[in-house]
Amino acid sequence: MAKPNFNKNHSGSVLILFAFLMPLFILMAGAAVDAGRAFVCKAEINKACMIAAEEASKEIDIDFAQMQGSVIIDTKSFKETVSKYFYSNILPKDNYNIESLEVDIMDSQDNPEYIIIKCRCRINCFFLKAAGIDSIAVNSAATGRLRRIK
Amino acid sequence: MMGFTDGKDYARKTIRYLLPLLVAVFYLMSVFIPFFVFQQDIFGDGWLKVDAPEGELIWIDTSHWETRKVLINDGHWENATRQRWIDTSYIVRDGYYATGQYRVWVEQVDLEPYTAARYVDTSHWETRYRYVDSFVPVNFTVISGTDSYGWSVYAFAAQSRGMQQVTYNGANYMASVYVIDYRPARGGRVYATKYVFAYRLDKQKQYYNEYVRSGYWQSYTAYRYVDNSHWETRTGRYWVDTSYTVNSGYWQSYNERTWVDTSYYQDGQVWVRSGFYGQPLHGKILVKKDPPFVFTKWHKDSAGSQCNMELQISWQIDNSALEPGMKPSQFSRAYIYQELIRFSGRGTEKIIIFDKNTGPSQQGSIIASAVFDYAGSSESILHIYLYTDDNRSVHAYFENPVNGYRSINLDPGGTSSGPEAWLGGNTYGEAEF
């Protein structure tokens, strides 16, 4: 029975290995790039949430405060201020979209201990699409309250 | 049957729980409804304070600036060239001796005796005496015309003759004299006298010192200096002085620095201190502040305007105790300012709110408005000074904190502390001065 005769020459094997691993490297690098974009986006919406929380905290009913001496949130201007300052501090881009922007007043409108602004953003992936991941969800939240100058 | 029992239990339970609830609701409504129905200004008793003048009279300062002539000291140094006479005159001493008669002034003072008189005073103290009457107390009784028994029998008829001077055994006495001059029915006469001796009159020698003035004039020999200076004609060798003076000199130029005074008078403002003591002011002051809680101008109200503070200050002077001839007191100027104590030791700000003449009035009011740049603590004071024409004043003041706020971000966990409470709250006050 004759012994199979394989070619003993190994030249080109690295090329083949590289050809197999190259897409994996590109995918990892792309994942890192997409993750970095997600972190940048998170920092940006976090900043916008903090500014919006800080500005919205000031939206109290000043007429009520002048007459009664206590704090009550002016809900109409409050929501407008949140929206205004949030979207003013975030750059509109094609590759992400704000899915939700929620505002909560703790404990109540007429006893506002503090406010919470929560944002959920979805960022479109570029490289990770190759791995079947089309987008990444980024969440951020910020709190704010009013402080009397003392 | 069972259903009926269940219904009774249910009603009982309902009453048991509902009744306390209704009582509580009724109590709360009875307490709070008047506040909503009868809305009024929040009145802080003692919030508005007034510096009431003490004492009967107060010093009314009428010091003022007055235009007067004021001496303005001015001048300068000036260099001038002047001439002065340098005297170089000298005396040429000359003369000669001559023989013959010449007159000499002889100075002579002699001591001469003369007769003078002097008074020799021989005044002295002398011890003298005199007799003075004295009363020596004595206590004895002498009855004449009867004995003590007979006197006691007819004592009922005794009549007093008063205190008399009586001589007894050669001595004088003061004695109460009683006399019985009784004629009994059986006939006859009973006459007796009773002396109750009280004092003995004695003459006592009393010594005393007396200054006796006496003296005489005495002649004696005294001495005095007499000027007997005289001209004397003498014969002999004497010096004939022929000295003479040679007059000479010249004019010399010299520089002199002199002060040229150019001081002058001009009209100037002089602070004249004056005043008088007058009756202190009495009356009432009312302050209305809106809003109760004041904020800085950086916060906007619902109309988009800066938060501010409105003040309405009313007064009424009580002139009922005015003295005749005195003019009724009237406020003619108001000065209102806020002394704002900033937080965190950032110092004190003074905000002048009103500083105008108001038109003299015994009863009036002013409205003022203010905005504040900075927040101030509860120690911030709003001062109100009301002045009369003669500079009398009333000082009212109250605590007026100014609120300000900012916003902060919190940790994700939030906080459990409640919202901020604002400083202030008073909106109306009245005080008497």
Image: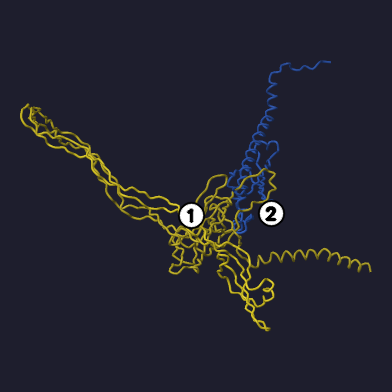
The hue of chain B in the figure is yellow
Residue situated in front as seen by the camera: A132 or B231: B231
Q: Which residue is drawn at 63% across and 70% down?
A: B143
Q: Where is residue B359 in the image (x, y as percent from the top left)?
A: 44, 64
Q: What residue type is labelled 2?
A: Ser
Q: Element at badge 1?
A: strand
Chain under numbered label 1: B
Residue marked by disc 1: B207
Residue marked by disc 2: A108
User: Which residue appears farthest toward the front when viewing the image?
Assistant: B188
Q: Position of residue B123 (x, y in %)?
A: 38, 50
Q: Residue at x 6, y 31 (%)?
A: B101
Q: Element at badge 2?
A: strand
Q: Which residue is drawn at 44% across and 65% down?
A: B360
Q: Is residue B325 above or below residue A50?
A: below
The chain coloured blue is A
Q: Is residue B264 left or right of residue B234?
A: right
Q: In this view, does B15 lie above or below B336?
A: below
Label 2, label 1: how far apart the Cα atoms are: 118 Å
